[in-house]
Image (cartoon, helix red, strand yellow):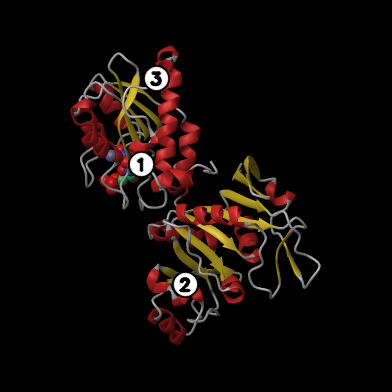
Amino acid sequence: MLGGCVLAAACQTPSALFPIGPSPATNSGMDHNRIDQRYMAAAIRLARRNEGLTGTNPSVACVLVRDDGEGWYVVASAITAPGGRPHAEPIALAEAGSLAKGATAYVTLEPCAHHGRTPPCAQTLIDAGIARVVTAVVDPDERVNEKGHAMLRAEGIHVTAGCMAKEAAEGLAAYLIQKAKNRAQVTLKLAVSADGFIGIEGKGQVAITGPVARAQSHLMRARHHAILVGAATVIEDDPELTCRLPGLQGRSPIRIVLDPNGRVQPGAAAIRTAGQGRTIIVLGEAVPQAHRLALQAAGCTIMPCEMEKGRVALPELLEDMAAAGIHSVLVEGGAKTAAAFLQEGLVDQVMLFNGAGKIGGTGKPVTSPVGERQLAAFEKRETLTLGEDTLTRYTAR
Ligand code: AOF
Ligand code: ZN
């Protein structure tokens, strides 16, 4: 999902997203399937709000609904808390209080069955007297993996699994990729001009898209755990790599700079501001100790990397990121970095902004690393119109 409505959703309270109290009689003619899809879709939208905020935990949403004879209505809804705990279900149950008894729970991920830092959510749902549980995605965590469903069924609770599983899996992609591939999820973001270029050599940042598209790209930053660029981008463009949407500045991702040869200087904006948001510099073994110390003194974290044919070994780096609790990374530049991730088959999703204007004609334009040949490995999902520009999302086949 591109999440056109996420910006609005990010500013609302969970309750404000749903009608509270009996909903109009339009429900009465709905069959169960349609009701299930309606509330699961609401849960999936809600879960997106804490994406990138829940650490190693997925951002899960739980919506509790009931029908007292006058139609279905939402009694409570919640998302996994920032940091990953508490889980969504106990928060929603606490909000519902006695109204939880006999209610239906819509949960985007199978409720957990393990005693972690919180008791199993399946047990909490049972104890609250929930009558029916509808879930979207089976939790691949080996401590859960159908055990949550089994616990509920063993207590006579009616369980419907797999409701809108594909849609929910999109929002849970970072978690599911981490479980399946043991690495961080990679989204490649590119802005390409109408004449097929992503910039002009030596010109720094060149405007390719308009303000609406730029706001959308900042929203993308907010929804990722980390943002990654190559050293050349830092040296030439000197970007801050923060989310500067009003009200969402606190959602800036961790900045990661690939700098195997130690070229980035402490004066760069992403380094200077390291104290206001984490900056990780990925350095090769040969980088002199004095340079490491200068970067550390500026507040950066150093991540050592393995090298392969003179380049950063990306699969290993993504594994190291997952081990460090970073589960989603937005690759923002430049052309060489993008090409390296693509060549290694490490891109899960491409977000392609197509600008309306041309930038060629002056200087040395940089050709887009993403053309028809590269996109053949991806499935086109949807296109948003953003002012004069467009944004198309592709996912790996
Ligand atoms: C749920 N509801 O909201 C989430 C779940 O370290 P712990 O104890 O928090 O457990 C982490 C696991 O909990 C995680 O791997 C996943 O299986 C599940 N996440 N489960 O019932 C939630 N976030
Ligand atoms: Zn749980």
Whether the residue carrying mark 2 lies under 8 Å from ligand 1 is answered with: no
Residue 336 is left or right of residue 107, and the answer is right
Q: Which residue is mark 1?
A: 141
Which residue is at a point 39% across and 79% down the rendered structure image? 296
Q: Position of residue 36 (x, y in %)?
A: 41, 23
Q: Position of residue 265 (x, y in %)?
A: 51, 81
Q: Position of residue 96 (x, y in %)?
A: 23, 31
Amino acid type at image mark 1: Asp
Q: Could you tell me which quadrant the C terminus lies in? A: top right
Residue 377 is left or right of residue 318, and the answer is right
Amino acid type at image mark 2: Ile
Q: Is residue 304 above or below residue 315?
A: below
Is residue 232 visible in the rendered image? The answer is yes
Q: Is residue 152 above or below residue 345?
A: above
Q: Position of residue 355 (x, y in %)?
A: 69, 55
Other residues around mark 1 within 10 Å, as few (<14) / some (14–19) / many (≥20): some
Q: Which residue is mark 3?
A: 24
Q: Real-space Cα distance between discs 3 and 2?
A: 55 Å
Residue 25 is left or right of residue 220, and the answer is left
Q: Which residue is mark 2?
A: 281
Whether the residue carrying mark 1 lies under 8 Å from ligand 1 is answered with: yes
The answer to which of 16 and 278 lies nearer the viewer is: 16
Q: Earlier in the sequence, mark 3 or mark 2?
A: 3
